[in-house]
Image: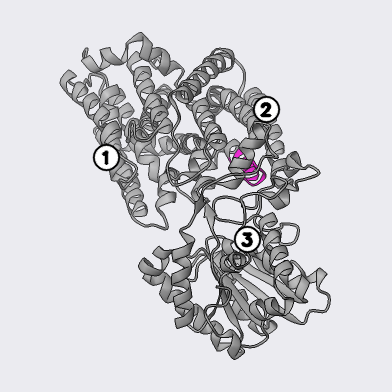
Amino acid sequence: MNTLLKYNPAIDGLRAVSVLAVFVFHLNKNWMPGGFLGVDIFFTISGYLITTILYRERLSSTFSYGNFYRRRINRILPAYFLVLSVTMVAAYLLVLPYDFYKFGISVISSIFFISNFNYAARSGDYFSNNAEQWPLLHTWSLSVEEQFYIFWPLVLVLLFYLRSKFEKSHAVTLLVVFAALIAVSAALGTFMAMRPDAAKWSYYLFVTRANELMIGAALAVAVIEYKDLRVHPMISNLAMVGLLLCLVLFNREMLFPGFSALLPCTLAALVIAPSRGSAAHKLLSVKALVAIGLLSYSIYLWHWPTIALSKYVLDFGGPTDFAFSPLGVAAVVAFTLLMSTLSYHWVEKPVRRMKNSFAHSFVYVFLLPGVLLSGLGAWVLYTKGMPQRFLSDQLDPRLAFYHIDKSKCPSFVSLGCQGNAADVPHPSERYLLVGNSHAEHYYQMVSALGTALGVQVDLASAGACYPHVKTEKCERVRAYVFGHLSDYDGILYAQKWTPRYFRENRVGVAAMDDFFAKLRAADKPVAVLGRIHGYLASADKVFNYHRLTDSSDAPLTMEIDDSYLEANVLLRDYASTEQLRFIDVEALLKEIGKRVRASDEHGRPNYLDTHHLSVYGGEWIARTLLANYPHSYLKALFFPVRQAPALQSADLGS
């Protein structure tokens, strides 16, 4: 039996539709709201093609694991590693240390095809604004496919066992098994997508996407087992129309993936199924579409890093979504097509046609370049994003691009971090600053005040931790706080206070009530730190743009975000009700005619992003307060030993 797959140009045409839909969606989500379905269509096509080859080789007893994986390595890895290498160089030049550190993680996870787990574990889902600037986000789908290639040949062994047991109805039996697997995978995807804590994992995991690949696989088995199978041209045409409608009518707000993915994937299967001269096949076989389809893998690889890094440089954040100008769109498209064409003709095709052994492909196409890239990624991790790239006489990147000094508090979850202990060998008091990233961005200010006033200040915090959040890292922070209360003379608390938190998050406020009640029960002074103003643009991004355009010493001019004002009013009322001291840092600065600027006199950013202080910013506040207020007043305000009557007002610092 001939195991070669007869070429069908309509499949390349559908690949073109898929990659163009994804490309358009990533350029601007409003242009084609369902364009993300292009990935799902790719999954169905891959399931069909791979299963057709494997199934025919099994039938003819010519299947070889070594030959199968040799073809996969030669087909996928050369262009893939080229894009990873070029993107790493570009990220080295363009990306700030903390984001470059995360990029190093992405490189390593991409090489070992586990990047879907990496992105599922991150904050923000596939459609969030920050994810749009992750240069290797698109590798999640390649990880899913590679996991399928590992899993699927083993499943075929079981399927052929079933085939041998049901000689008279083996085709029906196999398709029933496929239907059951598809239903289980889709049900799991839907169930997880409905749960806020599991929705991200549903989007990225192989088990919740397997149904999309298996729809294509089921078609392959049906076509091989029923050799005369043909889809009526009208059905093929209607499926094509329906698929195009899905690309327009689906959107990122839908419950996806799961059962909702079955419709576009089934329509895609009907489109690529054998048909007697359907208009859909004729349309998809047009030379222009076929040419794009042949480039589709390279286009997919190149388009996302080009878009993501462009947004990283040009998008400063703010209340409105970033959109490319017409010239920007043209530049992104032109660069993507140029690099795709070059890599297809000079990398993809030559290596794919190599008649080498599996061992040769494994060593020279995967292992050696993979080890080299992994080593570079590991070096990025070891150096914490290579901040020395930005080091100068005027700027220390560890202080400009972080909200906490990692040399003093290196852990992502800071438990009892004694950042200023070495500077206060004989402290008069010991205080604990508690909260999330907003506690961390105040830590430089509070610990610098403590150093000047003879107080040791420790930190117990983790990003995104509010009293109601039950994640492991947040539970660890709370366990430390309540397990070490006797070690401290008082508690300072900070988080990102918002009007919405007080008015709509009943669970959060109830958990906060309980949290503060437990703190007050320890009979220690407890204070909450109000928010300071933010900006409508991200200071580090504006600084980075200045750096890349050779104007890094220029002051950062950005519009102030005044949403903190209402939050502080609500926090003041809450503090009064709960008998907590309220410290309004913004009001303290305003009283002496000061305000934290976006950058200092040397052009160094005082903010990490739109609302977090950098270490420089926290240090500036401490210096300013110490220079303008009596030290005794600051000591009584921030670090009282006990709840003296004069300090029980909720209006301290306002």
Image quarter (top left, top right, bottom left or bottom right) of the N terminus: top left
Residue picked out by circle 3: 594
Disc 2 packing (10 Å; few <14; some 14–19; many ≥20): few
Q: Which residues are magenta?
A: 95-109
- Looking at this rendering, what residue extends furthest in the right direction? 425
- Residue 2 visible (yes or no): yes
Task: Decide whether the magenta segment is chiefly helix, strand or loop.
Answer: helix
SS at mark 3 in the image: loop
C-alpha distance separating marks 3 and 2: 62 Å
Residue picked out by circle 1: 176
- Location of residue 31 (image quadrant): top left
* Residue 361 higher or lower than 282, as above or below: below
Kindly identify the residue that appears in the image at 39 percent across and 28 percent down. 24
Q: x and y percent of residue 235 in the render?
A: 18, 24
- Location of residue 637 (image quadrant): bottom right
* Residue 644 higher or lower than 196, as above or below: below
Which circle's residue, 2 or 1, is located before the other in the chain? 1
Q: x and y percent of residue 437 in the render?
A: 58, 61
Which circle's residue, 1 or 3, is located before the other in the chain? 1
Residue picked out by circle 2: 363
- Residue 95 visible (yes or no): no
Type of amino acid at the residue the image marks with label 3: Lys
Foreground mark, 1 or 3, reads 3
SS at mark 1 in the image: helix
Kindly identify the residue that appears in the image at 26 percent across and 40 percent down. 176
Q: Is residue 585 left or right of residue 511?
A: right
